[in-house]
Image (cartoon, rainbow, N blue to C red):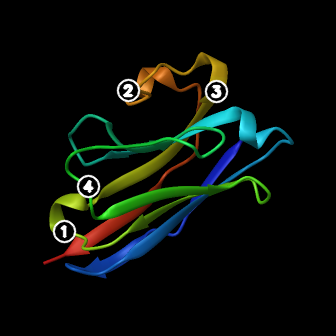
């Protein structure tokens, strides 16, 4: 599967952005999807994940209550709605995918994903 992330940009603190990740292929619902982010000089960290059916979602503590992951399987797209953005949310955001049956019970580590998009920059100014 190929992934194309978009929607990043520059926003002031407190603002909102919605990231999108479009996937190729005809079996999108059989893939669990995740969002990760990487700030300069730091490791790639988990942000949010969603099961293939959309029945379960997972969030990093740092974004709970501010970010929402969702998916539209008819459009082969996963979204990350980001509200209440903070300067510390500044990073390159990556979407990732893995066949649903290969995902762990809590798919929150980069090593749990096989397919990655190219990343989209999110910059939050104070």
Cα separation, mark 4 vs mark 1, equals: 10 Å
The residue labelled by disc 3 is: 100
If the image is split into quadrants, where does the C terminus sit?
bottom left
Tag 4 and tag 1, C-beta contact below 8 Å:
no
Horizontal side, residue 54 vs residue 87: left or right: right
> How far across and how far down the image is residue 87, in percent?
17, 67
Whichever of labels 2 and 3 marks the residue nearer the N terminus, that label is: 3
N-term-proximal mark, 4 vs 1: 4
* Residue at which label 2 appears: 109
Residue at the spot 24% in from the left edge and 47% down from the top edge = 40
Which numbered mark, 3 or 1, is in the foreground of this view? 3
Real-space Cα separation, disc 2 to disc 3, in angstroms: 15 Å
Q: On screen, 110 above or below 50?
A: above
Q: Which mark is residue 10?
A: none
Residue 38 falls in which quadrant of the image? top left
From the viewer's perspective, tell me whether residue 54 is left or right of residue 64.
right
Residue, far left: 126
SS class of the residue under badge 1?
loop
Image mark count:
4
Q: Residue at label 1?
A: 86
Residue tagged 4: 63
Q: Quadrant of residue 46?
A: top left
Above or below, 82 against 76 in this view is below
Q: Which is more foreground, mark 4 or mark 2?
A: 4
Q: From mark 3 to mark 1, how far is it between C-alphas?
A: 32 Å
User: Mark 4 vs mark 2: which is more N-terminal?
Assistant: 4
Q: Nearer the viewer, mark 4 or mark 1?
A: 4
Report crowding for label 1: few under 14, some 14 to 19, many 20 or more residues within 10 A (C-alpha).
some
Q: Characterize the local packing of mark 2: few (<14), some (14-19) or many (20 or more) Cα atoms within 10 angstroms.
A: some
| Cα separation between marks 4 and 2 | 16 Å
């Amino acid at each position: 599967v190929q992934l194309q992330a978009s929607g990043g940009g520059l926003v002031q603190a407190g603002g909102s952005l919605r990231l999108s990740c479009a996937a190729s292929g005809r079996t999108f619902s059989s893939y669990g999807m995740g969002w990760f982010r990487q700030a300069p000089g730091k490791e790639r960290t988990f942000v949010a994940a969603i099961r293939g059916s959309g029945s379960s979602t997972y969030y990093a503590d740092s974004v709970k209550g501010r970010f929402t992951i969702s998916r539209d399987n008819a459009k082969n797209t996963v979204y990350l709605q980001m509200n209440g953005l903070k300067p510390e949310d500044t990073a390159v955001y990556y979407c990732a995918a893995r066949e649903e049956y290969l995902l762990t019970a809590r798919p929150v580590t980069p090593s749990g994903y096989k397919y990655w998009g190219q990343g989209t920059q999110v910059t939050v100014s104070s």
